[in-house]
Amino acid sequence: MERNPDVLVVGAGPTGLAVACALAAQGVAVRVVDRADGPAATSRANILHARGVEVLRRLGALGDLPERSLAPQGIRMHAGSRPIATMRFTPDDADVQALFVSQAMVERRLRDRLAELDVRVEWGVACTGVTQTGDGVTVESSDGARTTAGWVVGCDGAHSSVRSAAGIAFPGVPVVEQFLLADVHTDWARDRSTSSGFFHPDGLLLAMPMPDPHTRTDGGDLWRLMAEVPALDRRIDAGEIVARFADLVPARTGDRDLRIRDAVWTSVFRIHRRLAEHYRRGRVLLAGDAAHVHSPIGGQGMNTGLGDAENLAWKLALVVHGRAEQTLLDTYAAERRPPASDVLRYTTANTRLLVADSAVGTFLRDRIVVPLLDSPRVQRAATRKASQLWVTYRRGPLGGRGPAPRPGDRVPDRTCLRADSGPVRLHSALNPAWVLLTPPGTTTADSLVRTARDHLGPEVSGLTDPTATGPALLIRPDAHLAWRGDTPDALHRWFGDVLHARIAA
């Protein structure tokens, strides 16, 4: 008889697949279901920022995505056909360069990694009800089947049935009217080294080069087009969307050389800003778009969901394995809801700036704000903001004070030494493992590693940072600092007092 899963993940988008990969790698029995009949072939999200690249690398799911992607160089903004500024992307770390890559391709690599962990997505299974008991959750499916699991993670999007069944409110407001979207093959001589944005009295138009999903090179003719339009009072099909773009592009850009050959995907969407009132209700947790939705301008949705996934998975794994109390899961919302709220605020502000519809707003945008994007300082700040490498949990319940890096801060990747096998990159040693990182000559290194393994399991890696001085660092699977110190006794107390781990007798 098949055992009940420790965790049922509902939704097989990037967030759900990443949660499942991280859990399975940590020895958690996980099952993944999705209401769709099969994997999506359309791109939907089309940019993976630096944070997302790091997460996929730690999960072992990055694979050949860098070779199959385009590296976004920037976006050139225009007032009509007149260029007014070029926003260049200037990453702090070339090792985690953002990628223009199809969401479908990201999901494919995550499914490949999940299959390596002996887990496969069950398609055509829609969640219709959730009932909690003291020690588990029963999920009802559209086919009448019932599944009992220890925990349920709802990663089933903005219209989450898990969130609805758990009774978690999802308040929010619309930001602008509507956008048309199309991924199209074109005959178009426009420069593909940057994206392009066009301000026009009738609305914003964006054009972004897309990689050919079937080759390792830039196909040279695939573009994503987005155009702000007045609210539509009826449904329109793909043919009409393409016909509208054939008119909108020359009207808003002044470029009459575009010829659309065919469309890969089209959509009509309205931008909303919503944030779940809670990320956890008992044994039900939310992640990704089920917990937060916002403007797609800036490409933060997939990035934020992957951050949710990695943060939640290591905590849930500790609870499932009996190494931590359930109270640890309350730190998930405490750490991840503030960054989501921040993303909602600045994507909303950016969207409202870009679609300014008053004479004053248009003047400020075209003559003052957007021209600032030519400044290298502004470009560095904007690139870092988009990357989400700035995210820190130092002010959360697992954070702390002291010199940098503080508990809760992200620890950048670096070359370390493993006693038995030589050089290793720090982030490659993370997830599913924790890392106990010490400077050379630390006399308590072995004792610290043993103490960490007593609480976290044998997967803890002991590494040496050959350039470091100061205390030892215990680094979480999501590359954030958990603890810093020198003595095994202090580390033991941290597990009891901060992580709420069950202390072995």
Image: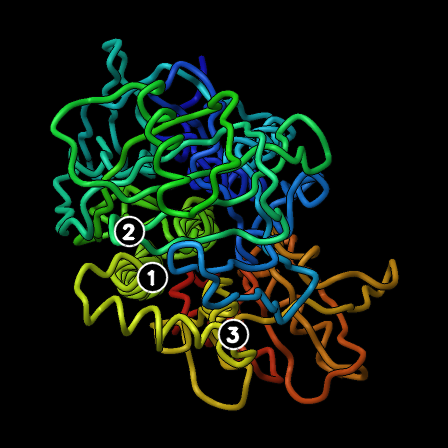
Q: Position of residue 450 (x, y in %)?
A: 66, 66
State yes or no: discs 3 and 1 in contact (Cβ < 8 Å): no
Q: Which mark is residue 374?
A: 3
Could you say whether the residue bearing mark 2 is in a helix, strand or loop? loop
Q: Residues within 10 Å of mark 2 (few under 14, many from 20)?
A: many
> Where does label 1 land, which residue?
343
Q: Residues within 10 Å of mark 1 (few under 14, many from 20)?
A: many
Furthest toward the top, the residue is 143
Q: Dividing the picture into quarters, in which one does residue 31 lie?
A: top left
At x 33% / y 26%, what residue is drawn? 241
- What residue is pinned by disc 2? 294
Q: Position of residue 123 (x, y in %)?
A: 41, 17
Mark 3: few/some/many CA within 10 Å (<14, 14-19, 20+): some
Camera-nearest residue between 152 and 186: 186
Gap between marks 2 and 1 measured at Cα: 8 Å
Point out the frontmost of discs 3 and 2: 3
Residue displayed at 81% across by 64% down: 418
Q: Nearer the viewer, residue 121 or 75?
A: 75
Residue at 42 percent across and 62 percent down: it is 501
